[in-house]
């Protein structure tokens, strides 16, 4: 049995416009196109759309989904991996829900929770490992580098560094978006503070090291896609800014 775009939209909750976009980017091809030009989808396409929806619910970008499904075309393998991802998220949410219920109970009784009880379920080592899993898999396959190998994760330090890095990249993206030149004093000051923070956290990172890292981002597909997904042109802007900063040192 074949289904029209409208029928697939009604079955899946995915808009017709989105289905057209999936076709355009090669993520979900129709089983066939009728003589009248209508897209028609079969059971295999509906199953693929289900897998796409699972990934989208876990906040994967479309390019990531396409790449993952091309790397692992077997439906059972994809569903099994998606089950692991969803169970990981469910377990974290369950821990957070328990903390929330306990908080409600304590407030109702006029009590205060112990400090160590307040944040159960937040920023666990498992959550960090899940967050780094895709990047770590890429680095291991391409460069034989394992981010998660060795000593246990220092969660407090990683949370601090993640927040600083997110703030720094958001600032760079804003500077690019608002037309601030890469060699503007404000951009250079932001890089200076970013490197200062990193060095305070044991990285021993020089201006030349940072310029080299941004050059690596330009030539590594995973990191390039990650930066460009945040703001078009960000990877190139960041490298230009890093080079300008290094030339001042």
Image (cartoon, grey):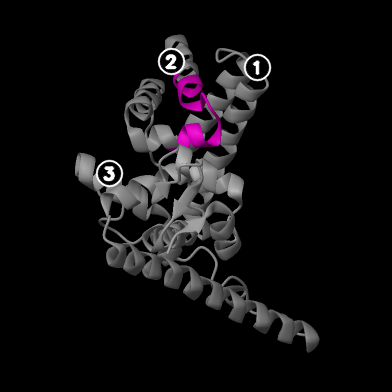
Q: Is residue 29 visible?
A: no
Q: Which residue is mark 2?
A: 243
Q: Which residue is mark 3?
A: 139
- The verdict on residue 227 being magenta is yes
In the image, the segment drawn in magenta is 226-239
* Image location of residue 2, percent across then percent down: 44, 60
Q: Residue at x 38, y 51 (%)?
A: 31
Front position in the image: 30 or 237: 30
Query: Residue 104: which quarter of the image?
Result: bottom right
**Predominant secondary structure in magenta?**
helix
**Quarter occupied by the C terminus:** top left
Q: Is residue 49 visible?
A: yes
Front position in the image: 89 or 216: 89
* Image location of residue 204, percent across then percent down: 37, 33
Q: Residue at x 41, y 59 (%)?
A: 42
Horizontal placement of 78 versus 174: left or right? left
Residue 169, placed above or below residue 111: above
Distance in Å between CA atoms under marks 1 and 2: 18 Å
Q: Earlier in the sequence, mark 2 or mark 3?
A: 3
- The verdict on residue 232 being magenta is yes
Mark 1 crowdedness (10 Å alpha carbons): few <14, some 14-19, many ≥20: few
Q: Earlier in the sequence, mark 1 or mark 3?
A: 3
Q: Quick one: SS at disc 1?
A: loop
Q: Quick one: SS at disc 2?
A: helix
Q: Residue at x 53, y 48 (%)?
A: 19
* Image location of residue 159, percent across then percent down: 51, 53
Distance in Å between CA atoms under marks 2 and 3: 24 Å
* Image location of residue 1, percent across then percent down: 42, 64
Return the mark for residue 179: 1
Q: Earlier in the sequence, mark 1 or mark 2?
A: 1
Disc 1 to disc 3: CB gap under 8 Å = no
């Amino acid at each position: 049995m074949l289904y029209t775009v409208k029928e697939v939209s009604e079955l899946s909750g995915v808009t017709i416009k989105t289905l057209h976009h999936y076709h355009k980017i090669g993520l979900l091809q129709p089983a066939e196109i009728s003589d009248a030009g209508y897209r028609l989808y079969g059971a295999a396409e509906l199953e693929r759309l289900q897998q796409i929806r699972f990934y989208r619910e876990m906040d994967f970008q479309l390019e990531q989904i396409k790449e993952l499904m091309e790397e692992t075309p077997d439906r059972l393998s994809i569903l099994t991996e998606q089950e692991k991802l969803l169970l990981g998220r469910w377990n974290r949410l369950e821990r957070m829900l328990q903390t929330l219920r306990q908080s409600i109970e304590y407030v109702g009784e006029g009590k205060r929770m112990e400090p160590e009880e307040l944040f159960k379920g937040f920023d666990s080592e498992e959550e960090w490992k899940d967050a780094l899993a895709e990047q770590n898999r890429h680095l291991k396959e391409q460069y034989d580098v394992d981010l998660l190998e060795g000593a246990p994760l220092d969660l407090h330090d990683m949370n601090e560094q993640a927040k600083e890095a997110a703030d720094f990249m958001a600032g760079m993206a804003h500077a690019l978006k608002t037309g601030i030149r890469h060699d503007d004093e404000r951009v250079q000051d932001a890089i200076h503070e970013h490197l200062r923070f990193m060095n305070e956290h044991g990285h021993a990172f020089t201006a030349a090291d940072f310029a080299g890292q941004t050059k690596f981002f330009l030539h590594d597909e995973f990191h390039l896609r990650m930066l460009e997904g945040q703001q078009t042109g960000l990877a190139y802007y960041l490298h230009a800014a890093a080079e300008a900063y290094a030339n001042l040192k």
